[in-house]
Amino acid sequence: MLKINKAKWAELFAALSAQGTLYLPAEVDGKVDFTVWQDGTEVNLQATQTAKSIKNVFFPQIENLLDFKTDGLKLSVEQRMLPEEDTIAFGVRGCDVCSFEVLDKVFLKEPVDAFYKARREHCTIVSLACSAPDETCFCDTFAIDATNPGGDVTTWLVGDDLFWQANTDKGKELTEKIQALLAEGDEAGVNAQQKATKEIMAKLPLADFKIDPKIPAEQEKVFNSAIWKQLSDSCLSCCACTYVCPTCHCYDVRDFEIDNKVERFRCWDSCMCKDFTKMAAVNPRVSRLERFRQRYMHKLVYFPENNEGTFACVGCGRCLQKCPVSLNIVKVAKALGVAKDV
Amino acid sequence: MLESEACENTNYNPLIVAFCCNWCSYAGADGAGTARKSYPANIKIIKVPCSCRVNPLFVLRAFLRGADGVILCGCHPGDCHYTSGNYYTRRRMKLLMSTLSYLGIEDGRMRVEWVSAAEGNKFSETMNSFAETIKSLGENVKLRDLRCKK
Amino acid sequence: MQKIAELIKKEAESLLKENKVTAVWAWQPGEFYYDNSPVCFTAPEQLDKLVYNEFCPSNLGKYLMAGSKKNETMAVFAKPCDTYGINQLIKDHRIKRELITVIGIPCSGMIDIKKIKNQGVKGIISVSVSGDDVIVTTAYGDKNFKKSEVLLAKCMSCKGSDYMIADKELGEKMEVKCQKLNPEDGVKKLEAMTSQERFAFWQQELSKCIRCNACRDICPACSCEQCIFDNQEAAVAGKASANTAEEQMFHIIRAYHVAGRCVGCGECARVCPQGIQLGLLNTKFAKDINEFYGKYQPGADDDSKAPLVDYKFDDVEPTISAKGVR
Amino acid sequence: MQKIGVFVCWCGSNIAATVDVAKVIESVKAIPDVAFASDYRYMCSEGGQDLMQNAIREHGLTRVVVCACSPRMHEATFRKAAEAAGLNPFLLEIANIREQCSWVHKDKEVGTEKAIALAKAAIAKVRFNSPLQAGQSEVVKRALVIGGGIAGIQTALDIAEAGYKVDLVEKKPSIGGRMSQLDKTFPTLDCSACILTPKMVDVAAHPNVTIYTYSEIEKVSGYVGQFEVDIRKRARSVKADLCTGCGVCQDKCPSKKTPNEFNQGLDNRSAIYITFAQAVPKVPVIDREHCLKFQTGKCGICEKVCPSKAIDYTQEDEIITQKYGAIVLATGFETIDLTKFGEYQYGKSKDVITSLEFERLTNAAGPTEGHLQRMSDGKQPKHIVFVSCVGSRDVSGRGKEYCSKICCMYTAKQAMLTREKYPDTDVTVFYIDVRTPGKGFDEFYRRAVEEYNVHYIKGQVGKILEQGDHLLVYASDALSNSHISLEADMVVLATAIQPSQDAKKLATMLTASIDNNNFFTEAHAKLRPVESPTAGVFLSGVCQGPKDVPETVSQAGAAAVKVLGILSKDTLATNPCVASCNERICSGCLACENVCPYGAIGGEEKTVINLNGKREQRVVSVVNEALCQGCGACTVACPCGAMDLNGFSNKQITAEVDAIC
């Protein structure tokens, strides 16, 4: 295991940044979010959670796909360039790392999403283990080990030292490039931190929250549950949960017309929205109940059913923090009785 | 400062959208035409039945799409063809202008003027003075959608 | 607050038992004490889940819209500030007055959990409030706060303990005890800046927007069947932020559409997941309206003419002076 | 996709001199849905219209854009032509490339570029035009004439003669107006009363005419063919049906200190009075402000002396509500206030009078029974100075910039008549210019100078001072470029005239526009001089601009003809450019109802299909298309865009904005 002292982090970030665009959690205007590192960026590795997820980096909220141009009566189509620059996502927590597994199952399956794939292939993920989980965290529910978050490189922040361990070829390649900055480190500190963190996690309110892996099989029963009405009645149908969720991946394709040009772009969408997926003029899920149910059925039932039991949730807890009316997947799962709340 | 740069650039020809009510200001513009009172060509008029038909959305849309200035002309208060339309315009636009200023948009990018059907002269003078103001303010960069580059 | 919670429960029980209403809107607890959600109770046996404490900021008025269309009789518990929004919804014909029973409940201010968490508090296990003392028990140890220092911004500019509409009032009126904030102070501060500074400020604020529409969806003045920004026909529909200009447009128009109708409940700013200071925009409109057209408090009644659908012959002209819009 | 036809007019050289028409054609042809584009020397000519109609038929055009003069000129022409070719007339738009392009820009390149931009904006708009069907509204076969002077009387008579009912409303207790105050009329010198009185009698006696004197317009609503008007008939305190007009009441009335308006305040009248001897109706009215009975409760003499028991102190104002198909404004004029012209001593010296006062002074029925005498001492003036252009053609801001038109002639008349009746009286006229364009006018003026020896001095009077019982007039003589001063016994000011004070109020009620001087604006200065821009409202007499009697009478007749054009129809096509509410998205907030100036919008609880395709019951806005005038105030008040305006829809305007920017 390698390590690097806080005193040398600035050098580390500069070195990483030389390898590609470096995204890392930084504080901007009182909020910690993934930001492109530059000299002077206020890096924050203490925050349990970035406000928005790492999804923004791989699957940005808005992305131009192609342009149509007219010249008199002639029409030409121009593809937008694939985003093929090298990037490094640094300081990604375990939950967010696992969100790629979910997104990969969507975007890398046929038909492959070329834009996502290009970004994904050109990115090296440097994860950061959790040491101070919050009450909203429940990654453990999905067997995610926040203390050993994986990715191409795993890092642990113990005291003023950042411990560094390459996991994949990509990770090793990156490590070699910055080898000069890293020193040999002792695993004991990391192990102690992992143990302490797990003890804390056990004390948190959601420690016992588990989702019954058998629920996909009970699809019909869950779908027809009477509880949806009461739950959805309180939902505002905003998209706050969707947009902060690291695994939600729906998008809409729209055109922006400018004189003799049309820019076709995609932008995030949410199944909670009234105007989501308009078929024959209207959203087939006409009621708030249906739309609300769809989001949670998708996360807890349909997605695992189609993807070897993987839930479309990584327990990051962002929706618990951001919902204007404090509705969230935990409340829903518990209300539905699919939680094994021991 | 953007402002001073634009001042020096004498070739800068600001794009101005003028919403004119059918009964007074559009007729005033016609009057300016009949009297051959010129004003910059980059001022383009959109006819609306009454100034109260102008939604702040249209104004913002014009800015978003790259207009450097938007001017709204209607009948003088009290003379509205529809009795009270311009009284609503007055409140609506007052608030919109105040808010644009509050958002840090240059004062003067938007203007409201009352021009009657008989005031061809005033129409032309107003347009000339507005174009001058916009010229001194320079290009609208603050409200423009970057996709709409001209 | 505990005492009031009991009164609420009793009232809800009698309303449902005596079939005076078919539904009662109140709050139910969440996972962490501070995350209560609005809920609709339809049977007395559900009421053991009813909660009322310092974490019930939501205005329940907007939830009455759906039932109103179905001619359902509903009761709603409303804090003094909530009654403004309810009046506004009645005025906008989104709620039928005759269908609803408004029960005023006293409030001594709601706590902003973000203020607590922003001080580095993590792993909250429970919160207990007694008078001005707030004890937060966390997995990392206990933390103490003064309630008056961790109130929601909207409570620090509380409009008072009077109900603008109430068929019945429970308990005794309470006051919010804290250093009072005037929402207009923030606006004045911005107004005093230079144009460039203001632009820079709003660029930063509005560029945070992710267009989740939470501000709109919580707003008691935003009660349209279909928001113009969701209407493809309106040519302003936008889901995502292409650049700040679109965000500016959305927020200007939203503030403009609620101008003279915004009751100043501060919910938009509270629910914004990005922490945009939306109140600064709505309060600006309110301040301008008060200055230009005379004092007006939306939601104080359900029949006055809103300033933007009204006029006077001698209204101030939209002219520009050297110092800006006057 | 639409098939749009674009037609670019040269307007001779009016457009073609500044706009490269061929280039405009070339540019619009490159727009995908432009199926046909052509230019023509005069699109409004028969040939131009044929070109358009043939193209519509041959190319199956679904939309048409005409790049030509202002839509105010020929939109109706082109729409009619399009309709004749089978295209809904509202699928045509005009790009105004004359008034708003070629006439205001000189550079051909700039003009061409702008013309292309305007054409593109019109094309962008027309794509979203929808076919509109004009509805029909019934015509109420009754006209209203506001103002009972010669203009109103003539208009009312002409309409009545054609067989239609007409109501004549006059604010004063009698009809007759200004003309009844005049002594003689130029250039024929007929006695004004002698020619006016028969007309007054005719109109009063006409079975189709109802006269409301001492009445004012209270409220106007509705639209052409269907105006609804409230007339406030003020309480006369005299029962008109019982009164015989004997005049005993005014003789016996003890309150006789009220300035007599009819004589321009030169003498006093009683509190109960008949305006003048030939008044129609010849029924007195009690001026309650000056009546002892009303002010103190004591008196009641008139009631006691009235032989026909016609006095009624309890009478109250009456509101008469009546529907009309058309309205004529004939509100006339008044002289301007001279307080800002201190140099003339008007109001300070009793011997400085206005020309209208002079008319009363020389009239046999006036305060001096026609004897020309000074108001100060009753002596006959030996030297009179007339000052023309007092407040007219005044750019100082104190008076009026316009020429009052009638002053030169009546000054000549007054000077001439003075000289004729009092040959020993010396008459001097100061003038800026003498304007005499009219039949027999210049001859008349020359007679005054040559036959009657009236001294005409081109120059302006700078100051008048009182000196003993004389007036000292300081003036400039522009021809000799010298300052002169002369003594006068009387000075007559040819005071500028201005529209009656009521014009502004009426303009607001009728939504008829007025110009900077409060004269009503005509729909077109040359081609529609008697029509106001508001459909169904016409202009008669000086309320539209200064006129003499014959001009007034001819315009009065013209206005009557325009009214008859409406009244002779059973129905009128309504403006289809009205607001419409999309009930699916209307939230029922009714902000639209609050701003509608016509009360055309109301909320209704309705079962509507909601956005999810389901039925639901809620309040929505409903537009009464017959009442809606299409201003669009509601469309902006509506936050969700449910309310839209035909012909100027959100989409159309947005498309124009996008095309321009």
Image (spheres, coloured by chain):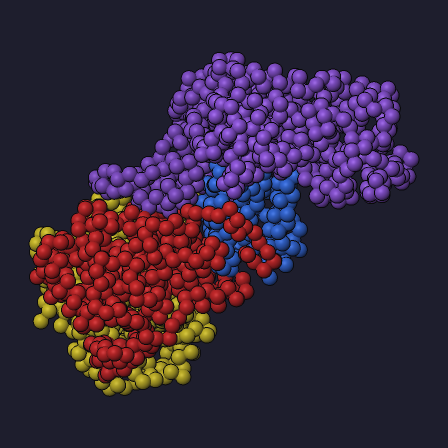
Chain colours: A yellow, B blue, C red, D purple
Up-down: is A27 above or below D330?
Answer: below
Q: Residue at x 77, y 41 (%)?
A: D349
Left or right: where D650 falls relative to C99: right
Q: Residue at x 42, y 29 (%)?
A: D321
Q: Would residue B111 be visible to someone looking at this image?
A: yes
Q: Where does the image place residue C153, in percent across and percent down from the top left?
A: 35, 69
Q: Which residue is drawn at 46% across and 74% down?
A: A40
Q: Would residue D79 be visible to someone looking at this image?
A: no
The image quarter in which residue A8 lies: bottom left
Tally of marks: 0
Q: Which of A224 and C92 is in front in this view?
A: C92
Left or right: where D354 falls relative to B82: right
Left or right: where A133 falls relative to D281: left
Q: Where does the image place residue A94, in percent across and percent down from the top left?
A: 25, 71
Q: Quadrant of the N terminus of chain D?
A: top left
Q: Nearer the viewer, residue A341 or C42?
A: C42
Q: Which of C215 and C151 is in front in this view?
A: C151
Q: Residue at x 21, y 83 (%)?
A: A196
Q: Nearer the viewer, residue D537 or A32?
A: D537
**Quick one: which residue is furthest to the top in this view?**
D162
Up-down: is A159 above or below D117?
Answer: below
The image quarter in which residue D138 lies: top left
Q: Where does the image place residue C2, in percent across and percent down from the top left?
A: 18, 72
Q: Where does the image place residue A273, in percent across and percent down from the top left?
A: 27, 51
Up-down: is B110 above or below D481?
Answer: below
